[in-house]
Image (cartoon, rainbow, N blue to C red):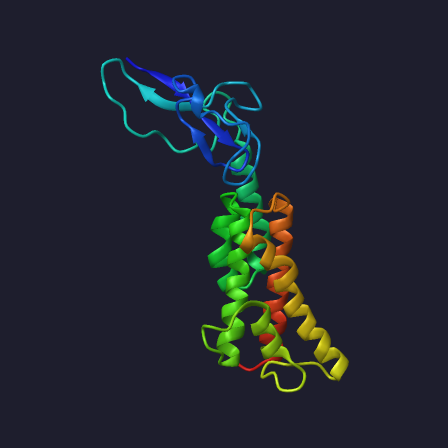
Amino acid sequence: MGTYDVMQVCMNGHKITHSYVENPEFRQSACDQCGADTIHKCPECGEPIRGKYLVEGVASVGGPDPPEHCHECGDPYPWEDEADQFAEVDASVLDDELAERCLSEYESGHYQSAVRTAFTVLEGRVRDKGGFPQGLSGAKLMLEAFNADEGPLSFGQTEGEQDGVMFLYRGAFQALRNPVSHRFVEDVDEDYARDAIHTVNLLLRLLDENTSA
């Protein structure tokens, strides 16, 4: 018969190590993917999370994925609660393409990547609707697309509203997309990513409602 080592997992469900006991050098106090705190025991009952199954004299390669529930008390681990909550509450209000491309990243705790992906969806939609080449992107694309003078996607009843729309789209890229695309941003946690995704969702909705396909 064999024994289980212990698994360490971040609060968002990223596996740190399945050999917590055998290889203590792999332990981390924070996740190197999303920055979340890590645990190796069930928060409810304190039972160690099962890691790699070890049999004496038998080589073991790889290990299990993070479980959804504690094998001792049956409670869901933190990463399972958060993923279910987002999928059930928010997915239905998102743009279809946005939900398809961002939800899996968000639910797995890849918050910075989810924000980048959301803006990639918006960028692609603007480029397609305006007939712009692939080489034009980001804030410059928004400026050309929504420019009040000749932007093909400009909308608003007054010049002031048209300028506001252009600044809204351009500013979103400069203030929200650029930081997460150019460097690691510690503030991109679950709440930030959710709000950024819903900001992109609003911009997609305004774009679709006010421009032709």
User: Measuring 50% from the left and 73% from the top, which residue is drawn there?
Assistant: 136
User: Measuring 52% from the left and 34% from the top, which residue is drawn there?
Assistant: 31
Q: Nearer the viewer, residue 23 or 98?
A: 23
Viewer can see residue 63: yes
Tell me if 142 is positioned left or right of 124 in this view: right
User: Measuring 64% from the left and 49% from the top, which residue is drawn there?
Assistant: 192
Asked which quadrant contains residue 118, the reply is: bottom right
Q: Nearer the viewer, residue 108 or 176?
A: 176
Please tell me whether residue 19 is drawn above or below residue 207 in the rendered image.
above
Asked which quadrant contains residue 156, the reply is: bottom right
Residue 83 image offset from top left, x and y in percent: 53, 43
User: Measuring 62% from the left and 86% from the top, which residue is drawn there?
Assistant: 150
Q: Nearer the viewer, residue 198 or 81?
A: 198
Residue 130 image offset from top left, x and y in percent: 53, 80
Residue 57 image offset from top left, x and y in percent: 23, 14
> How many numbered dots are placed on residues in this image?
0
